[in-house]
Image: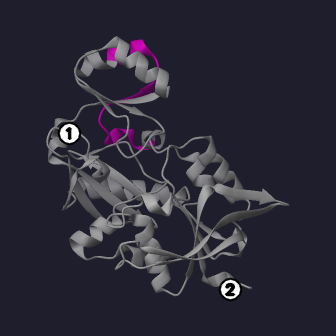
Amino acid sequence: MIYMTNKIVAIQGDYLNTLNIHTDSTIFLANEAQNRGYRLFYYYPENLSNIKDKTYAEGYFIKINYKKKIFYTILKKKKLDLSLTKYLLIRQDPPFNLEYISTTLMLDRIKEKTKIINDPTSVRNISEKFYSLNFKKYMTDTIFTKNLIEIKNFFNKHKEIILKPIHSYGGNDIYHLKKFNILKIKKILKKHGFIMCQKFLKKIKFGDKRVFIINGNICGAISRVPKSGSILSNMSKGAKPMTTVLTSNEIKVSNIIAKQLKKDGIYFAGIDFIDGKLNGDINVTSPTGIKTYFDLSKINLAKYFWKAI
């Protein structure tokens, strides 16, 4: 059977049965593509192969239906030459490990034939946390290290700090340090290696702001308020999403970052502010939140996403 090359959107994502249909941005984007007449081909990263310099994936043509409890129907299993697709979305969550890097290298081979979002070379080159150093003057005090003495000096300076693994995601393995516990820190360093250390911002209890960047433009924002007793603003950790308004300074900084992201080959990204300061996590691997934004505002950024392409 011959597939029309201009009517297929491929999606490299996480296991379908693990996705939360009520909040998932990948399915929200895919559903809009389906509404525009595209066929959806969904596959998992481990099912990529490069054979005779062609990049294949074993996956499934699927159909999405938000009204059903099981929101997807598998129409056909297929080994597909991904260069035959019109668009390909890189949407699997980190950790950003060697497997993730390997998938970007494979997809690099077809990006002259298929529009890949975000660009695999850019995804590979941009560390979501290290990249924020380009905008350090807009951030709270931050260092990157695995040196115990440097961490102790940083703690003594601020008395309360946050430790984040460089390549994790979703609020996982974030440590709020109120006391300098050398054994605990050694354990963290042994597990994660280099970490990001930041001055703790107490106003996180009032929530952060997630700003959506598409094609170099600010497209909207939501606030995410941690649940009682938590410092984590991730919705996957129980934070409550709310509507919000960006300050003039947050708009200024977001525009600066958006312009640079577009220059560096990133089409879709999410940036975060806490108490007016850039949070240092610039999400380019699988930005999320646009389904929640739609539920709160009725503004469909998936429509803008595809229209802007």
Q: Please state the extent of the stretch shown in magenta in the rendering.
A: 134-153
Residue 307 falls left or right of residue 155: right
- Camera-nearest residue between 95 and 163: 95
- Residue at image position (28%, 53%) is 235
Image position of 137 with respect to 180: above or below? below
Report if residue 180 is visible in the image.
Answer: yes
- Residue at image position (82%, 60%) is 53
Residue 219 falls left or right of residue 114: left
- Residue at image position (37%, 42%) is 280
- Camera-nearest residue between 33 and 121: 33
Report if residue 307 is visible in the image.
Answer: no
Image position of 8 with respect to 123: above or below? below
- Dot 2 crowding, Cα within 10 Å, few <14, some 14–19, many 20+: few
Tell me which corner region of the image, top left, top right, bottom left or bottom right, holds residue 182: top left
**Percent x, y of residue 23:** 33, 64
Image position of 159 with respect to 78: above or below? above
- The amino acid type found where label 1 is placed reads Ser
148 drawn magenta = yes
> How many numbered marks are there?
2
Question: Which residue was labeled with disc 2?
Answer: 4
Hey, which residue is sitting farthest right in the picture? 52
Question: Which residue was labeled with disc 1?
Answer: 230
**Percent x, y of residue 37:** 52, 87
Q: Secondary structure at mark 1?
A: loop
- Dot 1 crowding, Cα within 10 Å, few <14, some 14–19, many 20+: some
**Percent x, y of residue 299:** 28, 76
**Percent x, y of residue 239:** 22, 50
Q: Secondary structure at mark 2?
A: loop
Residue 89 falls left or right of residue 236: right
Image position of 198 with respect to 102: above or below? above
- Camera-nearest residue between 140 and 68: 68
- The amino acid type found where label 2 is placed reads Met
